[in-house]
Image (cartoon, rainbow, N blue to C red):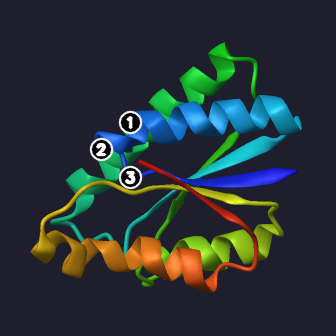
Amino acid sequence: MKIPVAYVGGLEVDQAVLEMAIKHAKAFNASPYIASSLERVSEKERKDLDKVEKQLAYVKETMDAEGIECETHILVRGLTPGEDIVEFAADKKVGEIIIGIGKKSKVGKLLFGSNAQYIILQADCPVVSVK
């Protein structure tokens, strides 16, 4: 089974997402696709890309240490993160998606909660949400 894991990096919930990905990869003999989505990368946002590359390298090292083969992907397709993850999952024909959700203020929910909601409602496969 293929499992895409939506990884943001820098959030408290990311460690829990990584642990769940390891658990599911071992239980289902799966190969996770660790994906992080950026809407665009301009010269100004280049630091964000560098940060994501380092975070995904950490995830890859962690998976390797657990004996799990995985692929890391930085998605830059001009889509929202929610749209990007759903499209990526459909392209890869995956068995499930693992995402992280965290506690947010009302404004945070308005701005960022929509990605998790979009993935949960639009994905063609089961979505595991980790908090």
54 to 65, vertically: above or below: below
- The residue tagged with tag 2: helix, strand or loop? helix
Q: In this view, does 47 lie to the left or right of 76?
A: left
Q: Which of marks 3 and 1 is in front?
A: 3
106 to 56, vertically: above or below: below
Give the residue pinned by disc 3. Answer: 8
Q: In this view, does 131 lie to the left or right of 87?
A: left
- The residue tagged with tag 1: helix, strand or loop? helix
Look at label 1 and name its amino acid: Lys
Residue at 74% across, 60% down: 96
Give the residue pinned by disc 2. Answer: 51
Residue at 59% across, 37% down: 20
**Marks 2 and 3: CB-CB under 8 Å?**
no
Q: Is residue 44 left or right of residue 10?
A: left
Q: Tag 3 or tag 2, which sits nearer the N-term?
A: 3
Give the residue pinned by disc 1. Answer: 54
Q: Tag 1 or tag 3, which sits nearer the N-term?
A: 3
Residue at 21% across, 64% down: 45
Residue at 41% across, 81% down: 80
Query: Mark 3 and mark 1: span between their CA atoms?
Result: 12 Å
Q: Is residue 56 left or right of residue 97?
A: left
74 to 71, vertically: above or below: below
Look at label 2 and name its amino acid: Lys
Q: Which one is nearer the viewer's eye here, 18 or 9?
A: 18
**Marks 1 and 2: CB-CB under 8 Å?**
yes
Query: Mark 2 and mark 3: span between their CA atoms?
Result: 10 Å
Instruction: Locate residue 115, reporting x and y percent.
Output: 41, 75
Instruction: Locate residue 58, reporting x and y percent.
Output: 46, 28
**Marks 3 and 1: CB-CB under 8 Å?**
no
